[in-house]
Image (tube, rainbow, N blue to C red):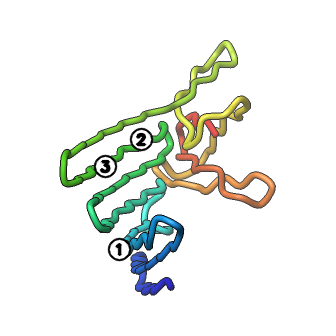
């Protein structure tokens, strides 16, 4: 069973589970409750931003997980935290990843791109300084370009 609630940029889920296994050694039983929430910026910002977090609990183990992702014109950042507690020990893990790309045509050097890729294009748009435009490739948004800047997509 999965209970879900959405409101605006928020998405919440509750997943209770119960499992019983019967074998020659007897009955093994496990219940777990998992609660998750996430927030995504949608079109609020030019960059893509998302936060996910959750807790879960079962007999003998509790977990806390969170993740933050930011992908903008100059690259992306991914940060996560995981904490697990059992009756005998506690473990906390942290991770931080940052990525960007660079490209040159011999005259200009461009740094950035929301996703790392093996191919890229540099976009330069003339217009009112500071304006931003979504860049679509095959109908899908691949990033955004800023007027007056060489932007790597």
Q: Residues within 10 Å of mark 1 (few under 14, many from 20)?
A: some
Describe the element under mark 1 as helix, strand or loop: strand
Q: Which residue is mark 3?
A: 82
Determine whether 69 is above or below 75 in the image. below
Describe the element under mark 3 as helix, strand or loop: strand
Viewer-nearest residue: 46 or 97: 97
Residue drawn where x is 39% and y is 62% of the image: 52
Q: Which residue is mark 1?
A: 35
Viewer-nearest residue: 145 or 34: 34
Residue drawn where x is 53% and y is 37% of the image: 149
Q: Which mark is residue 77?
A: 2
Question: First in sequence: mark 2 or mark 1?
Answer: 1
Q: Residues within 10 Å of mark 2 (few under 14, many from 20)?
A: some
Residue 68: percent from the left, percent from the top?
Answer: 37, 52
Q: Which quarter of the figure is the C terminus placed in?
A: top right
Residue 89: percent from the left, percent from the top?
Answer: 19, 45
């Amino acid at each position: 069973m999965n209970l879900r609630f959405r409101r605006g940029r928020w998405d919440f889920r509750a997943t209770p589970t119960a499992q019983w296994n019967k074998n020659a050694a007897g009955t093994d039983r496990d219940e777990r409750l998992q609660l998750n929430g996430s927030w995504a910026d949608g079109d609020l910002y030019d960059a893509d931003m998302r936060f996910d977090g959750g807790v879960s609990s079962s007999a003998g183990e509790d977990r806390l997980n969170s993740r933050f992702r930011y992908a903008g014109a100059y690259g992306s950042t991914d940060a996560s935290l995981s904490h697990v507690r059992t009756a005998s020990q506690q473990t906390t893990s942290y991770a931080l990843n940052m990525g960007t790309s660079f490209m040159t045509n011999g005259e200009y050097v461009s740094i950035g791109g929301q996703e790392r890729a093996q191919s890229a294009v540099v976009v330069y748009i003339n217009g009112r300084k500071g304006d931003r435009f979504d860049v679509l490739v095959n109908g899908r948004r691949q990033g955004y370009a800023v007027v007056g800047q060489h932007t790597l997509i």
